[in-house]
Image (spheres, grey):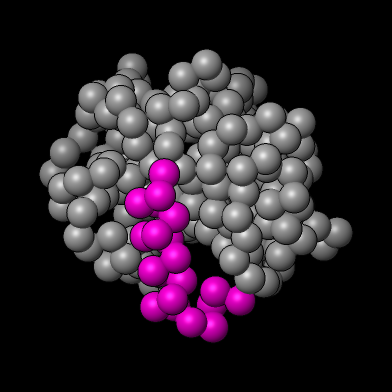
Amino acid sequence: MPFFTRGDVTIHYQEFGSGQPVLLFAPGLMRSSAARWDNTDLKPREVLADGYRVIVMDQRNAGESTAPVKPTDGWVDYAQDAIGLIDHLGLDRLALWGRCIGPSFCLKVLEQLGAQSDRVTALIDHAPIGLSAINRGHYMYGFYQWAEELPAGTFVEAVSVDLTAAAVCENLFGSDFVFSVSREFVRSMQTPTLVLPGRDMAHPEEIALETARLAPHAELRMGWQDDLPAAGAAVRAFLSSH
């Protein structure tokens, strides 16, 4: 069971197959872990069964990964975990595939890579989260459910555990759009992106459509949920073309 350590953060990851590397960012909001792919619609290990090196990570304090929770924690910390893993594995070029909260992690990775963002050859933006008129409370409720499940001592207290949790929740879900990056960043992206819109409160279609409009090199696939084999083939075709 491989682990990667970055400072006081320990990240659990798994690898399957060989070929073009694809790093997965799982659904599950704060519980984003490898196991969460088992109950999703498109399963990357099935879609990418041949010709791909599939790497799936548990985000900090999800699955088998651990980290202290500090009041300053936010999207940058998650992105740096992933970039650390990418460098640890020696991946000069790779694709990213995120579902649910996963695309928000992916976009922050691209932003943090900066001038090296061309290391990412393609992004699969799969049913992304994002702010609508009615759903901020959904994400915050999910955050606090996760926070209550963490082992005692995980929170590094600024004043109290409650205030630390409140600060981190605001850092993650206090902004708008996809929470992790701005619309201006998405407009500047050069990464080829395949957008598979969600269609429920947690994965609002309008956020995916806006991302597809903003990103200069985006392709949009509507109705993919109605023909999963065709959607899987489209993902493979997109990755192979980039």
As drawn, which residue projects farthest toward the bottom? 226
- x and y, in percent, of residue 158 in the image: 60, 20
- x and y, in percent, of residue 127 in the image: 58, 61
- As drawn, 21 above or below 93: below
- The residue depicted at 53 percent of the width and 43 percent of the height is 192
Depth check, front residue: 98 or 242? 242
As drawn, which residue projects farthest toward the right? 133
Q: Is residue 32 visible?
A: no
Side of 232 where 75 appears, left or right: right
Tell me where residue 216 sits by quadrant.
top right
- As drawn, 69 above or below 36: above
- As drawn, 127 above or below 91: below
Q: Is residue 231 visible?
A: yes
Main SS, magenta region, reads helix
- The residue depicted at 55 percent of the width and 47 percent of the height is 193
Q: Which residues are magenta?
A: 223-242
- As drawn, 59 above or below 220: above
- The residue depicted at 73 percent of the width and 58 percent of the height is 209
- Residue 236 is covered by the magenta coloring: yes
Side of 242 where 170 appears, left or right: right
Depth check, front residue: 123 or 26? 123
Quadrant housing the N terminus: top left
- The residue depicted at 33 percent of the width and 45 percent of the height is 22
- x and y, in percent, of residue 50 in the image: 20, 60
